[in-house]
Image (cartoon, helix red, strand yellow):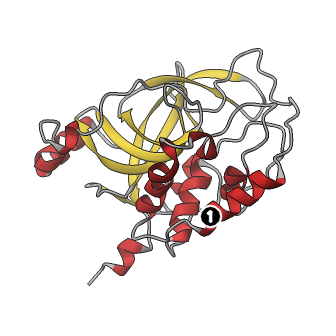
Protein backbone atom coordinates (compact mmCIF):
# COMPACT_ATOMS: atom_id res chain seq x y z
CA UNK A 1 0.00 0.00 0.00
CA UNK A 2 1.34 3.44 -0.95
CA UNK A 3 1.60 5.62 2.16
CA UNK A 4 1.57 9.41 2.32
CA UNK A 5 5.16 9.37 3.61
CA UNK A 6 6.22 7.38 0.53
CA UNK A 7 4.44 9.83 -1.77
CA UNK A 8 6.14 12.81 -0.16
CA UNK A 9 9.51 11.09 -0.64
CA UNK A 10 8.69 10.39 -4.27
CA UNK A 11 7.81 14.02 -4.92
CA UNK A 12 11.10 15.10 -3.36
CA UNK A 13 13.08 12.55 -5.35
CA UNK A 14 11.54 13.57 -8.68
CA UNK A 15 11.44 17.38 -8.86
CA UNK A 16 10.28 17.29 -12.49
CA UNK A 17 7.04 15.74 -11.26
CA UNK A 18 6.29 18.45 -8.73
CA UNK A 19 3.14 20.54 -9.21
CA UNK A 20 5.12 23.74 -9.82
CA UNK A 21 6.71 22.34 -12.99
CA UNK A 22 5.50 23.38 -16.45
CA UNK A 23 4.69 19.76 -17.33
CA UNK A 24 2.61 19.33 -14.20
CA UNK A 25 0.39 22.25 -15.25
CA UNK A 26 -0.17 20.78 -18.71
CA UNK A 27 -3.44 19.07 -17.75
CA UNK A 28 -6.10 21.04 -15.94
CA UNK A 29 -8.10 19.83 -12.97
CA UNK A 30 -10.84 17.44 -13.99
CA UNK A 31 -13.75 16.47 -11.76
CA UNK A 32 -13.62 12.83 -10.72
CA UNK A 33 -16.85 11.20 -11.85
CA UNK A 34 -18.05 7.63 -11.43
CA UNK A 35 -15.54 5.19 -12.92
CA UNK A 36 -17.89 2.25 -13.23
CA UNK A 37 -19.96 2.25 -16.35
CA UNK A 38 -22.75 3.07 -16.01
CA UNK A 39 -22.95 4.68 -12.56
CA UNK A 40 -24.83 2.04 -10.53
CA UNK A 41 -28.08 2.91 -8.84
CA UNK A 42 -30.53 0.88 -6.81
CA UNK A 43 -32.91 0.84 -9.75
CA UNK A 44 -30.34 -0.07 -12.40
CA UNK A 45 -31.34 -2.97 -14.64
CA UNK A 46 -28.18 -4.43 -16.18
CA UNK A 47 -30.19 -7.06 -18.04
CA UNK A 48 -31.55 -4.50 -20.53
CA UNK A 49 -31.06 -5.96 -23.98
CA UNK A 50 -28.44 -4.30 -26.14
CA UNK A 51 -28.82 -3.66 -29.84
CA UNK A 52 -26.30 -5.30 -32.13
CA UNK A 53 -23.39 -3.41 -33.69
CA UNK A 54 -23.54 -2.96 -37.44
CA UNK A 55 -21.11 -4.65 -39.82
CA UNK A 56 -19.71 -1.21 -40.59
CA UNK A 57 -18.99 -0.63 -36.88
CA UNK A 58 -17.37 -4.06 -36.57
CA UNK A 59 -15.13 -3.45 -39.59
CA UNK A 60 -14.21 0.00 -38.28
CA UNK A 61 -13.13 -1.52 -34.96
CA UNK A 62 -10.95 -4.11 -36.67
CA UNK A 63 -9.39 -1.45 -38.88
CA UNK A 64 -8.59 0.64 -35.80
CA UNK A 65 -6.87 -2.34 -34.17
CA UNK A 66 -4.87 -3.03 -37.33
CA UNK A 67 -3.64 0.59 -37.41
CA UNK A 68 -2.79 0.76 -33.71
CA UNK A 69 0.98 1.02 -33.04
CA UNK A 70 2.84 -1.60 -31.01
CA UNK A 71 4.88 0.81 -28.90
CA UNK A 72 7.32 2.05 -27.98
CA UNK A 73 5.66 1.47 -24.57
CA UNK A 74 2.24 0.16 -23.51
CA UNK A 75 1.26 3.66 -22.34
CA UNK A 76 2.07 5.01 -25.81
CA UNK A 77 -0.33 2.49 -27.32
CA UNK A 78 -3.02 3.68 -24.92
CA UNK A 79 -2.25 7.32 -25.73
CA UNK A 80 -2.56 6.61 -29.47
CA UNK A 81 -6.30 6.01 -29.06
CA UNK A 82 -6.67 9.39 -27.34
CA UNK A 83 -4.56 11.17 -29.94
CA UNK A 84 -6.54 9.67 -32.82
CA UNK A 85 -10.10 9.85 -31.53
CA UNK A 86 -10.69 11.70 -28.25
CA UNK A 87 -11.23 15.12 -29.87
CA UNK A 88 -12.44 14.08 -33.32
CA UNK A 89 -14.46 10.86 -32.84
CA UNK A 90 -14.89 10.19 -29.10
CA UNK A 91 -17.75 7.74 -29.63
CA UNK A 92 -15.25 5.37 -31.28
CA UNK A 93 -13.39 4.89 -27.97
CA UNK A 94 -16.33 5.12 -25.57
CA UNK A 95 -19.16 2.90 -24.38
CA UNK A 96 -22.77 3.86 -23.78
CA UNK A 97 -25.25 2.09 -21.48
CA UNK A 98 -27.87 -0.32 -22.86
CA UNK A 99 -29.74 -0.44 -25.14
CA UNK A 100 -26.72 0.85 -27.12
CA UNK A 101 -24.68 -1.95 -28.67
CA UNK A 102 -21.45 -3.09 -27.09
CA UNK A 103 -18.78 -1.05 -28.86
CA UNK A 104 -16.99 -3.54 -31.17
CA UNK A 105 -13.64 -1.92 -30.31
CA UNK A 106 -14.19 -2.59 -26.60
CA UNK A 107 -15.32 -6.10 -27.49
CA UNK A 108 -11.89 -6.60 -29.11
CA UNK A 109 -10.20 -5.54 -25.86
CA UNK A 110 -12.36 -7.97 -23.87
CA UNK A 111 -11.91 -11.05 -26.06
CA UNK A 112 -8.55 -12.27 -24.66
CA UNK A 113 -9.40 -11.69 -21.01
CA UNK A 114 -12.99 -12.56 -20.28
CA UNK A 115 -16.16 -13.99 -21.81
CA UNK A 116 -18.73 -11.28 -22.34
CA UNK A 117 -22.35 -10.91 -23.35
CA UNK A 118 -24.15 -8.30 -25.38
CA UNK A 119 -26.39 -7.38 -22.47
CA UNK A 120 -24.84 -6.33 -19.18
CA UNK A 121 -22.42 -3.46 -18.57
CA UNK A 122 -18.86 -4.79 -18.42
CA UNK A 123 -15.98 -2.99 -16.68
CA UNK A 124 -13.18 -2.94 -19.25
CA UNK A 125 -10.33 -0.92 -17.71
CA UNK A 126 -8.24 -4.06 -17.08
CA UNK A 127 -8.98 -5.50 -20.50
CA UNK A 128 -7.69 -2.30 -22.11
CA UNK A 129 -4.47 -2.29 -20.06
CA UNK A 130 -3.95 -5.96 -20.95
CA UNK A 131 -4.45 -5.17 -24.63
CA UNK A 132 -1.78 -2.45 -24.57
CA UNK A 133 0.74 -4.60 -22.69
CA UNK A 134 0.22 -7.60 -24.96
CA UNK A 135 0.38 -5.50 -28.14
CA UNK A 136 3.75 -4.24 -26.91
CA UNK A 137 5.00 -7.82 -26.69
CA UNK A 138 4.55 -8.29 -22.96
CA UNK A 139 2.45 -10.70 -20.94
CA UNK A 140 -0.66 -9.24 -19.37
CA UNK A 141 -2.61 -10.51 -16.40
CA UNK A 142 -5.02 -12.41 -18.69
CA UNK A 143 -7.92 -11.20 -16.58
CA UNK A 144 -10.58 -8.52 -16.86
CA UNK A 145 -10.19 -7.78 -13.13
CA UNK A 146 -8.41 -4.57 -12.17
CA UNK A 147 -6.94 -6.33 -9.13
CA UNK A 148 -5.33 -9.05 -11.26
CA UNK A 149 -2.32 -6.75 -11.79
CA UNK A 150 -1.33 -6.89 -8.11
CA UNK A 151 1.68 -9.01 -7.07
CA UNK A 152 2.60 -11.74 -7.77
CA UNK A 153 1.32 -11.06 -11.30
CA UNK A 154 3.50 -7.92 -11.56
CA UNK A 155 6.29 -6.54 -9.41
CA UNK A 156 5.47 -3.57 -7.17
CA UNK A 157 7.64 -0.46 -7.55
CA UNK A 158 8.34 2.23 -4.95
CA UNK A 159 9.31 4.92 -7.45
CA UNK A 160 6.93 4.84 -10.40
CA UNK A 161 8.06 5.71 -13.90
CA UNK A 162 5.81 7.03 -16.63
CA UNK A 163 4.12 3.97 -18.07
CA UNK A 164 3.92 1.95 -14.86
CA UNK A 165 0.50 0.68 -13.84
CA UNK A 166 -1.48 2.35 -11.04
CA UNK A 167 -3.88 0.03 -9.23
CA UNK A 168 -6.77 1.48 -7.24
CA UNK A 169 -8.67 -0.72 -4.78
CA UNK A 170 -12.12 -0.38 -3.22
CA UNK A 171 -12.68 -0.87 0.51
CA UNK A 172 -16.04 -1.34 2.19
CA UNK A 173 -17.62 1.06 4.64
CA UNK A 174 -17.33 1.16 7.59
CA UNK A 175 -15.09 -1.91 8.15
CA UNK A 176 -12.57 -1.07 5.43
CA UNK A 177 -12.47 -4.56 3.92
CA UNK A 178 -10.98 -5.06 0.45
CA UNK A 179 -13.91 -6.01 -1.80
CA UNK A 180 -11.72 -7.09 -4.74
CA UNK A 181 -12.85 -4.30 -7.08
CA UNK A 182 -11.22 -1.08 -8.23
CA UNK A 183 -9.62 0.55 -11.24
CA UNK A 184 -6.38 0.22 -13.17
CA UNK A 185 -4.61 2.65 -15.53
CA UNK A 186 -1.17 3.70 -16.73
CA UNK A 187 0.69 6.22 -14.57
CA UNK A 188 1.62 9.41 -16.45
CA UNK A 189 2.93 11.73 -13.72
CA UNK A 190 2.33 13.30 -10.33
CA UNK A 191 0.31 16.49 -10.14
CA UNK A 192 1.04 16.96 -6.45
CA UNK A 193 1.18 14.86 -3.29
CA UNK A 194 -2.50 13.99 -3.56
CA UNK A 195 -3.13 13.46 -7.28
CA UNK A 196 -1.69 11.71 -10.33
CA UNK A 197 -2.44 11.77 -14.04
CA UNK A 198 -3.37 8.40 -15.53
CA UNK A 199 -4.11 7.10 -19.02
CA UNK A 200 -6.66 4.33 -19.25
CA UNK A 201 -9.97 2.95 -20.44
CA UNK A 202 -13.44 2.92 -18.88
CA UNK A 203 -12.82 6.33 -17.32
CA UNK A 204 -15.35 9.09 -16.89
CA UNK A 205 -15.09 12.63 -18.22
CA UNK A 206 -17.57 15.48 -18.10
CA UNK A 207 -19.09 14.31 -21.39
CA UNK A 208 -18.62 10.54 -21.31
CA UNK A 209 -19.15 7.96 -18.57
CA UNK A 210 -16.88 5.32 -20.11
CA UNK A 211 -14.06 6.31 -22.47
CA UNK A 212 -10.31 5.99 -23.08
CA UNK A 213 -8.88 9.18 -21.61
CA UNK A 214 -6.15 10.95 -19.70
CA UNK A 215 -7.41 12.21 -16.37
CA UNK A 216 -6.43 13.29 -12.89
CA UNK A 217 -7.04 10.77 -10.10
CA UNK A 218 -6.82 11.39 -6.35
CA UNK A 219 -4.52 9.05 -4.44
CA UNK A 220 -6.53 9.04 -1.22
CA UNK A 221 -10.02 7.84 -0.46
CA UNK A 222 -12.75 8.82 -2.89
CA UNK A 223 -16.36 7.72 -2.41
CA UNK A 224 -17.72 5.55 -5.22
CA UNK A 225 -20.48 3.00 -5.65
CA UNK A 226 -19.87 -0.52 -6.91
CA UNK A 227 -22.11 -3.35 -8.01
CA UNK A 228 -21.16 -6.66 -6.41
CA UNK A 229 -21.44 -10.03 -8.13
CA UNK A 230 -24.65 -10.54 -6.14
CA UNK A 231 -26.16 -7.52 -7.90
CA UNK A 232 -26.15 -5.41 -4.75
CA UNK A 233 -24.90 -1.82 -5.05
CA UNK A 234 -22.66 -0.68 -2.19
CA UNK A 235 -20.93 2.55 -1.20
CA UNK A 236 -17.16 2.11 -0.88
CA UNK A 237 -13.93 4.08 -0.66
CA UNK A 238 -11.45 3.73 -3.49
CA UNK A 239 -7.79 4.68 -3.13
CA UNK A 240 -4.43 3.98 -4.72
CA UNK A 241 -3.16 0.58 -3.67
CA UNK A 242 0.22 0.42 -5.42
CA UNK A 243 2.21 0.91 -8.60
CA UNK A 244 3.46 -2.11 -10.56
CA UNK A 245 5.69 -2.36 -13.62
CA UNK A 246 4.57 -4.14 -16.79
CA UNK A 247 7.07 -6.10 -18.84
CA UNK A 248 7.74 -5.76 -22.58
CA UNK A 249 9.41 -2.38 -23.23
CA UNK A 250 10.89 -2.12 -19.74
CA UNK A 251 12.42 -5.60 -19.90
CA UNK A 252 14.01 -4.87 -23.27
CA UNK A 253 15.56 -1.70 -21.85
CA UNK A 254 17.50 -3.54 -19.14
CA UNK A 255 21.30 -3.55 -19.72
Above or below 76: residue 26: above
24 vs 163, left or right, is left
**Residue 40 lies in quadrant:** top right
Q: Which picture quadrant has residue 165?
A: bottom left
The residue lying toward the viewer, choosing from 7 and 53, is 53
The structure residue drawn at horizontal position 70% and vertical position 63%, both measured from the top left corner, is 62
Q: Quadrant of the N terminus?
A: top left
User: Can you give x and y, in whole percent of width and height, for residue 50 in the image?
Assistant: 85, 36
Q: Could one spot residue 113 in this view of the protein?
A: no
- In the rendered image, residue 145, in percent from the top left (x then y), is placed at 62, 49
Residue 23 in the image, given as x and y percentages of width and height: 19, 45
Could you tell whether 77 is left or right of 233 in the image? left
Tally of marks:
1
Q: Nearer the viewer, residue 171 or 194?
A: 194
Say which quadrant the C terminus sits in.
bottom left
Query: Which secondary structure lies at badge 1?
Result: helix
Q: Position of residue 96 (x, y in %)?
A: 69, 34
Q: Quadrant of residue 22?
A: top left
Between 4 and 194, the residue placed more toward the observer is 194
Mark 1 crowd level (few <14, some 14–19, many ≥20, 10 Å Cα) = some
Residue at screen point 51% across, 65% down: 133
Residue at the spot 36% in from the left edge and 72% down from the top edge: 250
Q: Is residue 80 visible?
A: yes
Outermost residue, top direction? 43
Q: Is residue 94 left or right of residue 154?
A: right
Q: Nearer the viewer, residue 237 or 165?
A: 165
**Residue found 39% across the figure and 44% down from its top:** 198
Q: Is residue 134 above or below residue 46?
A: below
- Identify the residue position indicated by label 1 in the image: 65
Amino acid sequence: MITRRTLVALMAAFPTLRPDSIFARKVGREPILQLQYPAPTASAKPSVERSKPTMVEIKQARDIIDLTPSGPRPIDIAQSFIDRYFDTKPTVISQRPPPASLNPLIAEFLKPTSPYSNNDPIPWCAAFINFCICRNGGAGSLSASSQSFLPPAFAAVDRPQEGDVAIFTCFSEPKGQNIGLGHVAFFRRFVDEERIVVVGGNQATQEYSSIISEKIMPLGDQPVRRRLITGAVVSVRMRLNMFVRPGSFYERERP
